[in-house]
Amino acid sequence: MKGLYTALMCSFDEKGNVNEKGLREIVRYNIDVQQVDGLYVNGSTGENFLISKEQKKQIFDVVKNEAGDDVKLIAQVGALNLDEAVELAQYVTQLGYNAISAVTPFYYKFDFDEIKDYYNAILDSVDNDLIIYSIPALTGVNMNLEQFGELFENEKVIGVKFTAPDFFLLERIRHAYPDKLIYSGFDEMLLSASVLNVDGAIGSTFNVNGKRAKQIFELAQNGQIEEAREVQKVTNDLIAEILDNGLYPTIKEILKYKDVDAGFCRKPMKSLTQEGVTKAEQIAERHL
Ligand code: HMN
């Protein structure tokens, strides 16, 4: 399960329906062109928190059908409605997803016992492994080393997607739990995380910049830090401009520029203005 995973985009039509043909093209582009090791399906980048349970199932179906066994597949099933999270975990396990992942429950201020119960309820319902999805900037949930340790006590919790700039905590987790998988979540910090010996990374920008991300990771693993720093610099020139123009819509426009039918974002996420589209195309021309 180690390696580089694209946090997969989903293609929607103007009304917000899943554009299956476009989604298949995104899957193929990631596997065939970006050559990533796996896909992380229905994460933040997939606009998961804006869609219905039926749409989530539809996306899980289409991605598995298109990817087959070409790459590893991780399904993000976390939801505030725990029954839905359990149902989705069972659904993707039957489909043959290699692992599930679940975001920490958010919005209400759940205490740690409640968070632990949430993960155990999902895990007790399936014969599959789970990767904790920790993204404090979006969820407001900050767990400490001991709390990660408590969750790791369940053998089915095989790792964490660590999307935070706290490299002190990252190093402590790495040191304390050498057998758990740690995936770096911020693409602009991939080199720093790789130096701390993470097992892989999961990122939105890999949809268009997966090859460079893999280079950074592999160079760092080989101890070629100077070379890795150069590729991270080029990558961050790209990421800075993408963030400035609007993260998900810009990645979609870049995909379209590469003839991949990435469609529209789900409302209330807004689409780019014509000026934004032109800017996205210039970003693609300059950096990709
Ligand atoms: C997901 O769940 O879709 C991703 O794994 C999230 C991933 O960590 C991305 N974070 C967000 O989109 C909030 C990053 O790839 C991020 O987009 C990138 O580092 C640019 O900041």
Image (tube, rainbow, N blue to C red):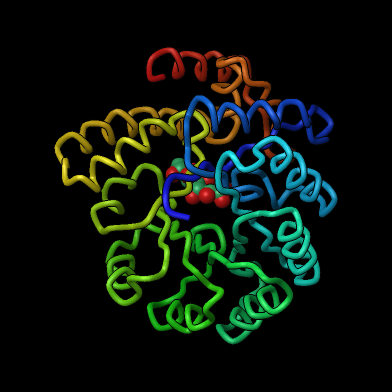
Residue 174 position, x and y percent, is 31, 68
Residue 161 position, x and y percent, is 47, 59
Q: Residue at x 16, y 46 (%)?
A: 223
Q: Left of 240 or right of it: where is 125?
A: right
In this rendering, the answer to whether 117 lies above or below 37 is below
Instruction: Please state, as top left, top right, bottom left or bottom right, where the C terminus lies in the image.
Output: top left
Residue 237 position, x and y percent, is 33, 29
Q: Residue at x 76, y 26 (%)?
A: 21
Residue farthest bottom in this picture: 113
In this rendering, the answer to whether 263 lies above or below 258 is below
Q: Residue at x 61, y 64 (%)?
A: 102
Residue farthest front in this picture: 69
In this rendering, the answer to whether 127 lies above or below 91 is below
Relative to the observer, which residue lies in front, 100 or 184? 100
Q: Left of 169 or right of it: where is 41?
A: right
Count of labels in the image: 0
Residue 32 position, x and y percent, is 53, 27
Q: Residue at x 36, y 42 (%)?
A: 188
